[in-house]
Structures are given as C-alpha cells and as structure tokens.
Amino acid sequence: MIDLTTTALTEVVVLGAHCDDIAIGMGGTLLTMARARPGLRVRALVLTGGGTEREAEERAALAAFCPGATVDLTVLDFPDGRSPAYWGAVKDALGVFRRTSAPDVVFAPQRHDAHQDHRTLAELVPTEFRDHLILGYEILKWETDTPQPTLFHPITTDVAQEKVRLLHEHYPSQVAHDWFDDLSFLGLSRLRGVQCRHPHAEAFVLEKALLTLGGE
C-alpha cells in the first residue's frame, strides 16, 4: 500500500449528525490518534440529541474514545431525521463552530450517505471548512450505502475489539438495533483491513487534497 502521512496533529474536528455517529464511524481512529498524541485537542459537534440521554451517552463515550485528549463537545438539538428542512440553521451553526476551531484534519460523514441527516451535514462541511483536509467516515446501518473508500487507517485487533466494547458500554440506547453487535462492527473493520493488508482498519472518503511530488 502507498503510505500517506500527516504532520503531527494538534487539533482535529469531528462532526456527527447523531450521538454515536462519530464513534461508530471512526472510534478506532480516535483511540489510535489520542494515544499517539497525548494532549490532542478534539473539537466535536453533533447536530441532534441535545438535552437528552443521548447527549449524556455521547459525552461519556467521547471521553472514553479520546484518552488523554482534551475533548470539547457541542451537542445541538435539531430534530432527528429533519436536517434538510433546517438547512440554513444547520449551516449557520456549523459556521459558528468553524470560527472557534483550527483543525489539522476534519472528520465528517461522507456525502453519499443515504441517511438525510448524515448527507446534509456532509454536503455542508466543505462550505465552511474550505481549506481543510476533510475525511468522510462510513456509518454502519441498514441502508445499502456502503462507500468505495480510497483511504484506510489501520487499527490493531485490540483497538477494533476495544471500539466494540466501548460502543456497547456507552450507547445502551442503541443496543436493541439488530445491526448493533460485535459481528457487524468487527466484520466491517476486518473487511477494511483486508483491503489495506492489515488486521483491521477504518476507511474514509477523501473530499479533496493537494499532492506534492518529489523534491524537498
């Protein structure tokens, strides 16, 4: 595999439409980044779930997924499943958040996600984070919208298993879903690992990037 490496990360932004999207899409990557870079600042914005039990779940989960990092989480209260109807307000909220952050990398849903809330957020992110590396994560669910990713972040088997454990521990409101189980999460990360010749991986859709070839 061709290896692409970033400079040392100081701050990352993670964006989700719902509480649990970030952890499902990139929980293993969060664990790996936080452990590799103590003191990493993680700025997180979630559009829905504010003031509910979902917000409490998200705060506890991101603290666990980002050991040693400084986590700054904002959970808004847009209606679940209605983000397209609140397009202007979501864009305004994203703009306010953007002006308080200076990330090295932005993680968000990928823009071909079939869920309307995920897709709306994904489409708006490049309109606010115009000069940033944006990586679109995949969210396992029942829709047949699994992307064909081009960028893979390897994770160890231990990290893949820890991600699953933390998902079950911190999102009790979701465990009744028939797709919310060990086989589903480990199956996807194992598939992505096969595709990049590692035990497990999380995959991302690259929004846009500049490439410098050769020379110093």
Image (tube, grey):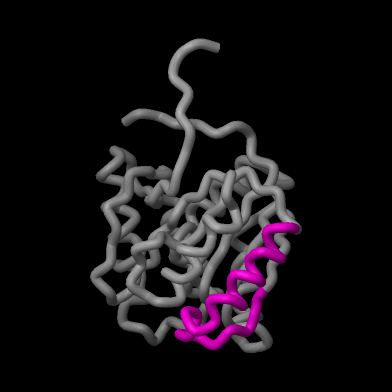
Task: Find residue 151 and report its image quarter.
Answer: top left
Q: Position of residue 22 (x, y in %)?
A: 51, 65
In the foreground, 23 or 16: 16
Identify the residue at horizontal 32%, vertical 77% (top origin): 179
In the foreground, 40 or 127: 127
Q: Quadrant of the C terminus?
A: top right
Q: Is residue 156 visible?
A: no
In the foreground, 147 or 211: 211
Q: On screen, 30 above or below 97?
A: above
Identify the residue at horizontal 54%, vertical 82% (top origin): 86
Q: Position of residue 162 (x, y in %)?
A: 48, 59
Q: Main secondary structure of the magenta part?
A: helix
Residue 153 belongs to magenta span: no
Q: Position of residue 61 (x, y in %)?
A: 60, 69
Q: Quadrant of the N terminus?
A: top left
Residue 91 belongs to magenta span: yes
Residue range (magenta): 75-99
Identify the residue at horizontal 41%, vertical 60% (top origin): 110
